[in-house]
Image: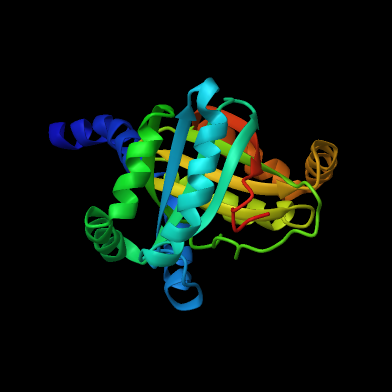
């Protein structure tokens, strides 16, 4: 009887620990269904690894930095076993900051690319030139969400589109719950705006989710966000996910001239 009482007493604490490590019971059940479906119906999860690079450039070296990238990045994407998804400059947010997303064929592809670049004189020259322009740089290795594959790079048909990078730092153990809510919420959002990509980190700054959206303008961004709030499923997604976030950050970016996304 004493052991039974102790088990009952410890159950809430064990349940809390289990939730922190693995997400809520309902989210796990929902996520398991999603996972089984993703293996048969999608090719996103597990097929590619995406590296998100962040470069903070010295203010007096921005023009030189852009010229170096324009010369080397298209060649790198053509010659190395890697694909450039997009390159952007932050115009509202952390200025003199640039983001680049590279796609590899899984971790094997990343290893193969790293080995090839280690022997590349062009890559050595690129790194040497870049170091003189940078204040700092960092990178994350990420995966796509299975329900939100990276959109193929293409012309938007808009003269000067803007891209929004939204970064969410989640509480550890809540990724599966985040995924199950966003899978439903995305159906509401994509009625009004084109979702470009969504990634979760695996190496680097962990428990981090990043979304990229494309808009015609800041005014169009406001209008589409206002419209989404009128959809019940979007309200529910925000309500359920805001409690999972430690902090979040939104930045507006414009594509560099050589970026596959324009």
Residue at image coords 44%, 45%? 52
Give the residue displayed 26% in from the left and 65% down from the top.
108
Q: Is residue 107 visible?
A: yes
**Colour mode of the rendering:** rainbow
Q: Is residue 29 visible?
A: no
Front in this rendered view, residue 207 or 32: 207
**Where is residue 15 drawn, in percent x and y?**
33, 38
Q: 14 or 163: which is nearer to us?
A: 163
Rendering coords of residue 60 (x, y %): 53, 21
Q: How many marks?
A: 0
Extreme-bottom residue of the structure: 40
Q: Relative to residue 248, is residue 214 depicted above or below?
A: below
Q: Is residue 38 left or right of residue 173?
A: right
Residue 239 on image: x %, y %? 64, 36
Residue at (35% x, 34% y) in the render: 16
Q: Is residue 82 left or right of residue 198?
A: left
Which percent across, then down, holds residue 11?
29, 36
Above-or-below relation of 136 to 28: above
Q: Quadrant of residue 222?
A: top right
Q: Nearer the viewer, residue 210 or 52?
A: 52
Q: Can you tell which quarter of the image residue 262 is in?
A: bottom right
Please state, as top left, top right, bottom left or bottom right, where the N terminus lies in the image: top left
Q: Quadrant of residue 240?
A: top right
Left or right: 120 in relation to 131 = left
The residue drawn where x is 40% and y is 36% is: 130
Does residue 100 appear to the left or right of 165 in the view shown? left
């Amino acid at each position: 009887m004493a052991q039974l009482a102790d088990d009952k007493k410890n159950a809430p604490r064990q349940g809390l620990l289990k939730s922190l490590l693995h997400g809520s019971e309902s989210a796990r059940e929902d996520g398991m269904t999603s996972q089984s479906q993703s293996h048969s119906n999608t090719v996103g999860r597990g097929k590619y690894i995406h590296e998100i690079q962040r470069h903070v450039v010295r203010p007096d070296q921005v023009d030189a930095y852009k010229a170096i990238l324009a010369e080397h990045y298209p060649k790198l994407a053509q010659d190395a076993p890697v694909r450039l998804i997009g390159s952007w400059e932050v115009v509202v947010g952390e200025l003199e900051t640039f983001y680049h997303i590279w796609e590899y064929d899984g971790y094997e592809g990343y290893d193969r690319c790293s080995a090839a670049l280690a022997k590349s004189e062009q890559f050595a020259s690129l790194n040497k030139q870049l170091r003189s322009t940078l204040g700092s740089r960092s990178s994350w290795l990420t995966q796509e969400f299975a329900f939100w594959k990276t959109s193929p790079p293409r012309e938007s048909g808009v003269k000067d589109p803007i891209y929004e990078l939204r970064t969410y730092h989640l509480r550890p153990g809540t990724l599966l719950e985040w995924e199950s809510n966003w899978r439903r919420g995305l159906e509401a959002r994509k009625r009004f705006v084109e979702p470009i990509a969504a990634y979760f980190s695996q190496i680097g700054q962990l428990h981090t989710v990043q979304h990229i959206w494309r808009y015609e303008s800041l005014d169009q961004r406001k209008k589409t966000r206002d419209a989404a709030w009128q959809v019940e499923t979007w309200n529910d997604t925000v309500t359920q996910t805001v409690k999972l976030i430690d902090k979040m950050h939104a930045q507006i970016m414009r594509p560099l001239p050589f970026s596959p996304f324009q």
